[in-house]
Image: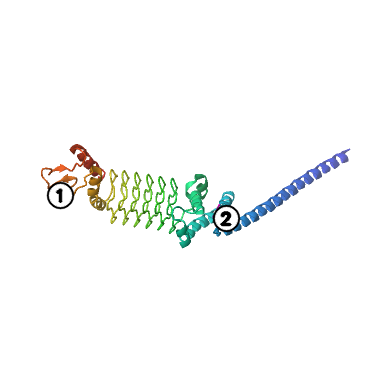
Amino acid sequence: MQALTYIGIILAIISVVFGIFSIIFIIINIKAIRNQNDNAIRSERNERFKNAINQLGSENNAIALGGIYTLHRIAKEDESYRENVFNILCSYVRDITITDEYKTKYTEKPSEPIQTILNILCKNENDYKIYKEYIIDFSGANLSCANLMNANLIDTHLWNVNFKDADLRQSKLLNTNLSEANLTNAHLEMANLTEANLIDANLIDANLFFTTLTLANLKGANLTRADLQEADLKGAFISNANLTGTNLGNACLKGTTSIVRTILYKSFEYYIRLGINKQTDLSGISGGYDKNNPPYAGKPITGKYTEEEAKQMIENYYNNLK
């Protein structure tokens, strides 16, 4: 009887061991199958990636678009591809837009593939957030007439980019390098350019109404006829900037350097002409007041406004310089 008990115990142990080995075998098989699947998926993604790169080189916009969307889908699916996809898309924007053929063909708006990349990398939050670790570099690109309204371009490299006639309204350009960029007639209303580098940038006829330029570097920038009404220029650096005809109506200039104030005082005549609507010769006018022409000597130039309204406008202007 005791022998039968031992036999039963031994059989039970054998059964347990067999069960364990069976489980181990199953796990090994599952891992092998999983590895096979992973390898198959990886191989399929590599093939898609390779095909997408070839599509990008097509002159047919529809085919190029297919390549862009495929690359972006791969980046969403697999993080290991993400940086390569990001760099390829940035490079595509830089390389394609500077060709003579592109410049000749797309004079009123970007090509569909270029605008699509801008949407993915800068405008659509659900898209660009997956690339948040990487810094956009469009340096030297031709993005004239591009739609970048509400775009996220924080910390980006936009040196020497052509943004002529581009729509950058309400865009975020904090700490962005826009040195030597062409922003002629660009729309930057309500954009945030805090601490942006705009050294030697061309802002002729640019619209900067209500734009934030706090601590921005505008050294040598050309702001001829730019509209800076209500703009925030606190602490901005504007030495050697060209402010000919610049509209600084109610712009906030607090914390700017004495050099900046000297430059901005030179624009005061234009401010007075615009704000007080005095279109005649302003010789003899100093600080908004007529110094030499009796019977108005010592009085503010008023144009269409009352003397009190003119005094208030002049006071507001100088308060914004403090």
Q: Main secondary structure of the magenta part?
A: helix
Q: Does any portion of residue 19 appear in the rendered image?
A: yes
- x and y percent of residue 147 in the render? 45, 49
Q: Residue at x 88, y 41 (%)?
A: 3
Q: Amino acid at mark 1?
A: Gly
Does the rendering let one see residue 133?
no
Estimate the x, y position of residue 259 in percent, counting from the top left.
25, 53
Q: Which residue is mark 2?
A: 63
Callout 1 crowding tier (Cα within 10 Å): few <14, some 14–19, many ≥20: few
Callout 2 secondary element = helix
| Residue under numbered circle 1 | 284
Q: Pick whichever, 74 or 184, lies toward us.
A: 184
Q: Is residue 65 magenta?
A: yes
Q: Where does residue 174 sit, x and y in percent of width and height?
A: 40, 49
Which residue does the image show at 25% across and 43% down from the upper left? 275
Does the segment drawn in magenta span residue 163?
Answer: no
Residue at mark 1 to residue at mark 2: CA–CA distance = 66 Å
Left or right relative to 59: residue 203: left
234 or 316: nearer the viewer: 316
Farthest bottom residue? 100
Towards the viewer: 16 or 262: 262
User: Which of the image's four quarters has the N terminus?
Assistant: top right
